Image: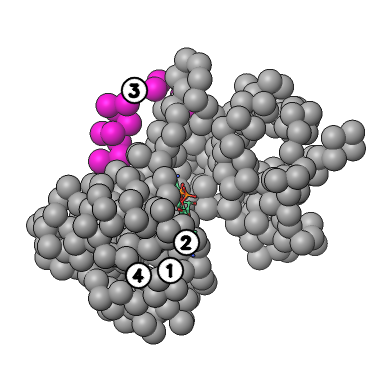
Amino acid sequence: MLFDFPDFDDHELVLFGRDTATGLSAIIAVHSTALGPACGGCRMWPYANDTEAMRDALRLSRGMSYKNAMAGLPLGGGKSVIIGNSRTDKSDDLFRAFGRVIDSLGGRYIAAEDVGITVADVMTMGQTTRHVAGLTGGHDASGDPSPFTAYGVYLGIKAAARHKLGADSLKGVRVAVQGLGNVGSHLCQHLADDGAVLTVTDIHADNVQRAVDRFAAVSVAPERIHAAEVDVYAPCALGAVINPRTLAELKATVVAGGANNQLETDAMGEALRSAGVLYAPDYVINGGGIINVSAEVTHAYDRESVLRQVERIPATLSEIFRRADREARPTSAVADEMAREILAAGKDGQKKAAA
Ligand code: NAD
C-alpha cells in the first residue's frame, strides 16, 4: 500500500502518468510545497519494476525538500521518474506527453534535468508546459549548474577543514577527488588555485590525465580512492560510497564532496561520527546547482546574486558542525532535523496565510 511505504513520509501527492501512444510511464512525487512550488529533476531509468521506480521518486523527492530548505530557497521538494531506457526509449512525442502530465499540476511541480535526461529533453517538455527549468536558452535561462555546485563544494570543504583540521587555508591540505566530470573538474581547479594537494580518480583515463597535467595531481585506481592517504575525501561521482567497507579503509578525517546520497544507509552518519570523521551533509554542500536553477524559476536570474547565495553554504555547514558537536550527534541527522524545522515553519506560515 502506497501510504505505508517507508519512503512515503507524508508526500503531498504522487501522480502516475501514462500515455499509451508514446509509451510513457512516469511518476511525479511532490513531497512538500510548504516553501514554494516543488522543484527537482526528472530521471529516466530502466527500473526493474514499478515499486523500485516509486521508491526512487519518493526518496529523491524528499531529498529535494531538504536540499531546497537548507539552501534557503523559495522552493518545495519534488522529483519525477520516467520508466524507460534513456538510450533507446526517448522520443520528442514522449517528452511532449510528459510535459502535459507536468502541466496538469498547474505549476505545483517544476521539472529540471537529472540522470538520463538532457537539457534538450527538458526543452522538448517545455513545448507543452512552462513548468520546466535548467534551460540554456531564453530569458532568465540559468545554464549549466555544475560550476556553481563545484564552487559551493569548494567553500564547504574549506569550512570543514577549518572545523576539523583547524586549517585557515587549503594550502598543503591533501584532498582526494573521486570523479572528474562536470563538478569534480571545476572543484579541482578551485582546490588547486588554493594550494591543495590533489589525489584524483575517474573511470575515464582522459579525465584523469587532464587533472594530472593541469593540477599536478596524483592518480589512483577508482576502487582505491576512498583509502587514499589524504585529509579530505571528496566524492563527486556515485552515491553510497560511504559504507562499512569503505569506512574501514578511510584515512581522511573529513568527507565533503558533491555527489548525491553519499551515505549507503542513514546509520553511516553515526558510523562516521564515532570513527572521528567529519561529514559535510551532501545535500547541503552540493546546493549550489539548485540555487542557480532557483534564480531561473523565480525569474530573477543574476549571476552575482547567485554567487552570494552559494557563499552562504559554509555558514550553514558550520552551524550544522557546531550543533552536531554540542549534541554529540551525526551531522547528517542534525541537517535532516534542521531541514524538517524549516519545512514545519513553512507549513505553519502557509496555514496562517490561509486563515
Ligand atoms: P558527471 O557525469 O559529469 O561526472 C561524474 C564523473 O564521475 C564522470 O567523469 C565519471 O566518469 C566519473 N565516475 C563514474 N563512476 C566512477 C567511479 N566508479 N569512480 C570514479 N569516477 C567515476 O556528473 P556531475 O554533474 O559532475 O555530478 C557528479 C555528482 O554530483 C553526482 O552524484 C551528481 O548527482 C552530483 N550533483 C551534481 C550537481 C551538478 O550541478 N552537476 C549538483 C548536485 C549534485
Kindly check if marks 3 and 2 are in contact, taking CB atoms under 8 A apart as contact: no
Give the main secondary structure, helix, strand or loop, of the magenta stretch. Answer: helix
Q: What number is the disc on residue 203?
A: 2
Q: Amino acid at mark 4?
A: Val
Within 8 Å: ligand 1 and the Cβ of disc 2? yes
* Label located before the other in sequence (1 or 2): 2
Q: Residues within 10 Å of mark 4 (few under 14, many from 20)?
A: some
* Label located before the other in sequence (3 or 4): 4
Instruction: Give how far across and how far down residue 288 sits, in percent.
Output: 37, 42
Q: Which residues are magenta?
A: 297-314
Name above or below for residue 277 compared with residue 86: below
Q: Which residue in the structure is indicated by mark 1?
A: 222
Kindly check if marks 1 and 3 are in contact, taking CB atoms under 8 A apart as contact: no
The answer to if 299 sits in the magenta stretch is: yes
Q: What number is the disc on residue 302?
A: 3
Instruction: Give how far across and how far down residue 110 sits, in percent.
Output: 59, 33
Q: Which element is circle 2 on?
A: loop
Q: Residue at x 46, y 57 (%)?
A: 204
Kindly check if marks 1 and 2 are in contact, taking CB atoms under 8 A apart as contact: yes
Q: Is residue 348 left or right of residue 15?
A: left
- Pair 3/4: label in front: 4
* Label located before the other in sequence (3 or 2): 2
Q: Which residue in the structure is indicated by mark 4?
A: 220
What is the distance, in whole Å, between disc 3 and disc 4 at their CAs?
Answer: 39 Å
**Residue 294 in view:** no
Within 8 Å: ligand 1 and the Cβ of disc 1? yes
The front one of 275 and 43 is 43
Q: Amino acid at mark 1?
A: Pro
Instruction: Give how far across and how far down residue 250 sits, in percent.
Output: 34, 78
Q: Residues within 10 Å of mark 2 (few under 14, many from 20)?
A: some
Kindly check if marks 1 and 4 are in contact, taking CB atoms under 8 A apart as contact: yes
